[in-house]
């Protein structure tokens, strides 16, 4: 989430006369839409499919007590995953659903705008979530959405400033946003 504050009192009197409480929300919405478009633009394409087996990171014990490394925390988890695969509930190919589900939302107030980017897909945190959410399998190949936005924040800020300047100029000229 990114939030930019715009202080109307800091504008000179000519601008204050043109950009008043009536125009400020539309200006903030304009800035927010431009920022949202930039955020969506910087989201990377899907990485190449790795086809790698799940890494064996969990130490488990066989019935005879000998240790071995497994991709699953427990026999119960392993059984559930294989059952879901058998029931075709675990996709074996990419569908693009996650990428299509990443959207932005803009909430404009008279003096600020909040832009959110995210997805409502239940499994998204395991694929593109933060370090504490992203699965170890996906961490090897996938980007993290919050990290991508943080890296591109200077470009998103520049787009916000450009949109603010353009929006103010359009309002001064009597144009609509």
Image (cartoon, grey):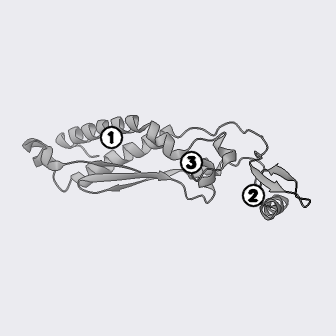
In this view, which residue lies farthest toward the right? Answer: 64
Position of residue 40 measured from the top left corner of the image (x, y, whole percent): 48, 43
Residue 153 against residue 125 in the figure, above or below = above
Assign a secondary structure to mark 2.
loop
Callout 2 touching callout 3 (CB < 8 Å)? no
Which circle marks residue 160 in the picture?
Answer: 1
Residue 104 horizontal/vertical position (percent): 46, 51
Indicate which disc, 3 or 1, sits on the residue closer to the N terminus: 3
Question: Which residue is the site of mark 3?
Answer: 131
Image point (83%, 59%), residue name: 82
Classify mark 3: residues with Cα within 10 Å, few (<14), some (14-19) or many (20+). few
Give the left or right position of residue 163, taking residue 142 as reference.
left
Task: Judge from the rendering whether residue 85 lies leftward or rightward of residue 8; answer left or right.
Answer: right
Which of discs 2 and 1 lies nearer the camera? The answer is: 2
Query: Residue under circle 2?
Result: 73
Counting from the top left corner in percent of width and height, residue 107 is at: 35, 57
Check contact, mark 2 vs mark 1: CB within 8 A. Answer: no
């Amino acid at each position: 989430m990114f939030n930019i504050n715009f202080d109307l009192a800091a504008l000179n009197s000519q601008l204050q006369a043109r950009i008043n409480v009536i125009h400020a929300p539309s200006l903030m919405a304009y800035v927010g839409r431009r920022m949202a478009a930039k955020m969506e633009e910087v989201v990377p394409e899907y990485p190449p499919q790795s086809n790698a087996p799940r890494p064996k990171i969990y130490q488990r014990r066989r019935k005879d007590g000998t240790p071995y490394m497994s991709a699953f925390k427990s026999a119960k988890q392993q059984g559930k995953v294989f059952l879901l695969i058998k029931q075709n509930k675990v996709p074996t190919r990419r569908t693009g659903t996650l990428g299509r589900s990443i959207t932005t939302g803009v909430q404009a107030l008279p003096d600020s705008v909040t832009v959110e980017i995210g997805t409502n897909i239940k499994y998204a945190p395991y694929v593109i979530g933060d370090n504490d959410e992203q699965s170890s399998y996906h961490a090897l190949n996938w980007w993290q959405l919050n990290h991508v936005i943080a890296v591109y924040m200077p470009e998103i800020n520049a787009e916000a400033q450009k949109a603010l300047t353009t929006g103010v100029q359009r309002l001064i000229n009597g144009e609509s946003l």
